[in-house]
Amino acid sequence: MILDSIKKIKKFWLSDTSFISLLIVLLCLNFIVPVLIDAEIIGEYSLNAIYLFLFLIGIFSSDHLWFKVLTISFFLLQVILRFIRFSDSDTEFYFWEQVVILMNLILLIIVNLKLLFRDKEITYYRIIGAVNVYLMLGLIGVSLLEIIHLVFGNSLEGSWKPDEETLNFPNFIYYSMTSLTTVGYGDLIPINAAARMTSVFLSAVGILYPAVVISNLISTGMAKKKEDQ
């Protein structure tokens, strides 16, 4: 019974229709969760639960042995690090949590790109999948900014400044997405070389991603249609 349920779940997350479900999760995480955190409606527990759910999706979306091993390993490591931090222990590994989140996101992007280009087909769902990868790049920016903040003591300044008492996620995702979309309102600015290069990286990826990935996806689909004719 349990094995059948796992197979059904895995079959769903390997299908094209799963891209819509993943899109809903990412839209909530990127745009709704920051507002709820800022309004103090939800807190760190909820944010971590959504992240863990996202990484759990990565496990079921993996169709290659090595990707399964890596996604499961990083997911379990993430759970262990979270358990240590939220337990009564005085020890926490917040820096390594962010590193593992970064690795999980990179794996999730690779897994989704593999799903996008499988069978050389283009569908409405595949376009949604391409948008999902774009939103995950914004989350990568958050992890990079968190790591920079932990290593150098700060990363951004302006209308808001990171601190240890509140969740930095709402402002980091805001800065990451405005950099990724090359909007750059200027109310937050990077204050060290690492943060500046992260900003440049996000902006460059934000420009190149649609040109390279989405155009490649469309051209691959058109080539597949010609082969089938």
Image (cartoon, helix red, strand yellow):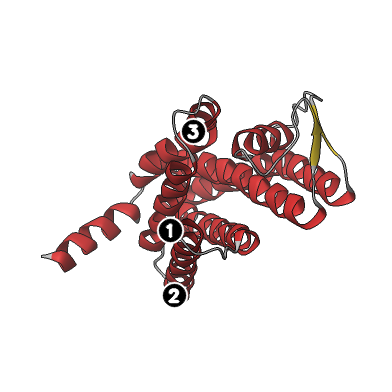
Name the secondary structure under disc 3: helix
Q: Nearer the viewer, mark 2 or mark 3?
A: 3
- Amino acid type shown at disc 3: Val
- Amino acid type shown at disc 2: Val
Q: CA distance from mark 2 to mark 3?
A: 30 Å
User: Which of the two discs, 1 and 2, labels the residue nearer the N terminus?
Assistant: 1
Q: Position of residue 143 (x, y in %)?
A: 64, 51
Q: Which residue is mark 1?
A: 58
User: Which of the two discs, 2 and 3, labels the residue nearer the N terminus?
Assistant: 3
The quadrant of the rendering that contains the N terminus is bottom left
Q: CA distance from mark 1 to mark 3?
A: 20 Å
Name the secondary structure under disc 2: helix
Q: Which residue is mark 2?
A: 69
Mark number, residue 33? 3
- Amino acid type shown at disc 1: Gly
Classify 141 as above or below 175: below
| Neighbour tally class for label 1: few under 14, some 14-19, many 20 plus, Cα within 10 Å | many
| Neighbour tally class for label 2: few under 14, some 14-19, many 20 plus, Cα within 10 Å | few
| Res 229 visible | no
Tell me if label 1 and label 3 are in contact, CB under 8 Å: no
Name the secondary structure under disc 1: helix
1, 97: nearer the viewer: 97
Q: Position of residue 84 (x, y in %)?
A: 48, 64
Classify 157 as above or below 18: above
Tell me if label 2 and label 3 are in contact, CB under 8 Å: no
Classify 15 as above or below 124: below
